Image (cartoon, rainbow, N blue to C red):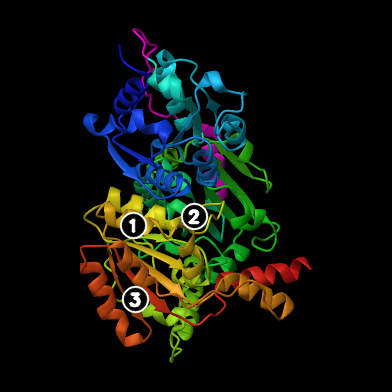
């Protein structure tokens, strides 16, 4: 008779999952011992939050559910930050936690806490299989919940006795159906195109929905057929390369001032698979003209018109909507508008401004100077994981997004530090491509032990840490508002030596001439490599944006 653990592993494999992220613990041993025998790769990490962050990234990369498994008690509580990050990123992670035997619940057992109650507010669905025979059914339900509609994490708590118990019959998982998206209304398609066709200054803002819907080619064909300027944000970065003539770069005005001016001047805004949220200023007048007309496409009806009145709303999948747009436009394509020349000018002016920052000489290196030099030598197929912090935001301003799926950000929770687990998932998924993490010295400290994970699993990522010996962004914000800072200073730590201690390699970069040879050595290394870049603490455009917002708010 199969045990619950055997049924769990068998069902995971039947669902097409071949990698599981975990950190070992007593509740999991029955499961983990079985996995290598069934062809499941066990990616064991050093912190349970790192486990769920990596599983989140894996789900985003593959556009389908992933699995994290952690032990109960503190293993579960440690995992909650990663689950919350996946929730706000709409990432379909099946988060499994072990637990004390079910017959010891509410009796003062070791590590007995309400795991389902803790997880429920941040997942789409949470449950506990009551018996070994129901594990396949519950796992199949978890898959369906995570992968339906607007995707998101789910949680299963599985007690130890349910895993070790045996059964001679079981309820199988339902077949894993492909997620279906609502189709657009044909009248609304016509209305949307009429509004766009009549516009003098239209812009398109594409978000993560493009990535999840696998709609890259439709998006590119649409902007080309309609001659519309495109701004991308979150997982849409790189879905149409920044070197495309109609791609105007980052759709975040805090990073791209050209986008700020364009949005303020636009008379029609088409938002594809993107919430009109804090990144878009809640649709307010700091970012958009009050009389600008909005068209929004989203599979989640509650998002439509939430923060901004819409002229046309389409509750539909972006892929199907773009296909319908293309069919309606037909041939010949729309003629380009003079507006495109204005946007190219704005983009050139912003590039010149960044270039002026990059001309600053001396040491410590200015972050813009470093990134402008690094840009010359990064290969076009590189994949990037971006953490938080002023150093990183300079890089997001300067480096282009050239590759679909190659621009991994923290997500709306903004859990700094999580980009290190993200970059490990990127490398696991793309073992033959260069993967580069950009992080600050503060952010790296959260999951620094995952450098050991990179070494143990033979993941030769490049870790670029901007070392200004402090929490640079918070230091700038405090100084801007109070003229002083508190709790923002760190030691000048030798992060390249920490990497060596874990079994990788690394070096210090503190002069401009060192950048090219250092990145070449890092990219050619067969082990994880840390570039400890000594930089000056200086306010990034992102932080300037935050400071300006607080002044307006005051």
Q: Residue at x 47, y 70 (%)?
A: 441
Quarter holding the C terminus? bottom right
The reply to whether the C-beta atoms of the residues labelled 2 and 3 are less than 8 Å apart is: no
Quadrant in the rendering for residue 379: bottom left
Residue 172 x, y percent position in the rendering: 37, 14
Q: Earlier in the sequence, mark 2 or mark 1?
A: 2
Q: Residue at x 57, y 51 (%)?
A: 413
Residue position for label 1: 452
Which residue is pictured at 27% across the width and 51% down the height?
457
Stretch in magenta? 166-195
Q: Earlier along the polypeptide chain: callout 2 or callout 3?
A: 3
Question: Which residue was labeled with disc 3?
Answer: 374
Task: Looking at this view, name the residue that lies furthest to the bottom.
Answer: 362
Density class for disc 1 (Cα within 10 Å; few <14, some 14-19, many ≥20) is: many
According to the picture, the residue beneath numbered tag 2 turns out to be 410
In this view, the mark in front (3 or 1): 1
> Looking at the picture, does residue 500 appear above or below residue 217?
below
């Amino acid at each position: 008779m199969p045990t619950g653990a055997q049924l769990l592993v068998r069902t995971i494999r039947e669902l097409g999952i071949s990698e599981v992220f975990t950190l070992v613990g007593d509740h999991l041993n029955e499961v983990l011992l079985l996995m290598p025998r069934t062809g499941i790769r066990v990616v064991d990490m050093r912190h349970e939050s790192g486990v769920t962050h990596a599983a989140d990234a894996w789900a985003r990369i593959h556009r389908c559910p992933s699995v994290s498994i952690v032990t109960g008690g503190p293993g579960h509580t440690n995992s909650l930050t990663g689950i919350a990050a996946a929730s706000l990123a709409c990432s379909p992670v099946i988060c499994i936690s072990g637990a004390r035997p079910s017959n010891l619940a509410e009796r003062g057992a070791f590590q007995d806490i309400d795991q389902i109650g803790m997880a429920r507010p941040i997942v789409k669905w949470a449950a506990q299989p009551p018996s070994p025979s129901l594990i396949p059914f519950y796992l199949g339900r978890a898959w369906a919940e995570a992968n339906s509609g607007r995707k998101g994490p789910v949680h299963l708590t599985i007690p130890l006795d349910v895993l070790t118990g045996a059964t001679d019959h079981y309820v199988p998982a339902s077949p894993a159906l492909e997620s279906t998206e609502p189709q657009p209304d044909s009248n609304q398609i016509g209305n949307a195109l009429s509004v766009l066709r009549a516009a003098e200054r239209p812009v398109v803002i594409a978000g993560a929905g493009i990535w999840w819907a696998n709609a890259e080619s439709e998006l590119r064909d649409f902007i080309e057929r309609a001659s519309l300027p495109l701004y991308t944000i979150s997982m849409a970065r790189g879905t149409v390369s920044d070197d495309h003539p109609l791609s105007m770069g980052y759709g975040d005005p805090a990073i791209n001032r050209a986008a700020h001016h364009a949005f303020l001047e636009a008379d029609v805004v088409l938002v594809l698979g993107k919430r009109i949220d804090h990144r878009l200023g809640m649709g307010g007048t700091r970012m958009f003209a009050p009389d600008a007309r909005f068209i929004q496409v989203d599979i989640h009806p509650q998002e439509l018109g939430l923060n901004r009145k819409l002229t046309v709303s389409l509750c539909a999948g972006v892929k199907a909507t773009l296909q319908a747009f293309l069919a309606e436009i037909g041939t010949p394509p729309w003629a380009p508008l003079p507006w495109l020349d204005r946007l190219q000018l704005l983009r050139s002016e912003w590039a010149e401004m960044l270039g002026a920052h990059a001309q600053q000489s001396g040491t410590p290196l200015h972050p813009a100077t470093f990134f402008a030099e690094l840009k010359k030598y990064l290969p076009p197929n590189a994949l990037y994981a971006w953490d938080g912090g002023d150093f990183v935001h300079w890089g997001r301003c300067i480096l282009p997004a050239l590759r679909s799926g190659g621009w991994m950000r923290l997500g709306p929770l903004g859990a700094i530090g999580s980009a290190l687990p993200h970059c490990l998932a990127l490398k696991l998924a793309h073992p033959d491509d260069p993967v580069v993490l950009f992080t600050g010295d503060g952010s790296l400290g959260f999951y620094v032990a995952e450098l050991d994970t990179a070494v143990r699993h033979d993941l030769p990522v490049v870790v670029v840490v901007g070392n200004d010996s402090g929490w640079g962004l918070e230091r700038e914000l405090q100084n801007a508002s109070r003229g002083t800072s508190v709790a923002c200073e760190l030691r000048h730590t030798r992060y390249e030596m920490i990497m060596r201690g874990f079994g990788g390699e690394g070096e210090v970069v503190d002069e401009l001439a060192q950048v090219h040879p250092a990145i070449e050595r890092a990219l050619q290394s067969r082990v994880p490599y840390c570039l400890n870049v000594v930089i000056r603490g200086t306010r990034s455009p992102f932080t300037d944006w935050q400071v300006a917002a607080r002044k307006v708010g005051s």
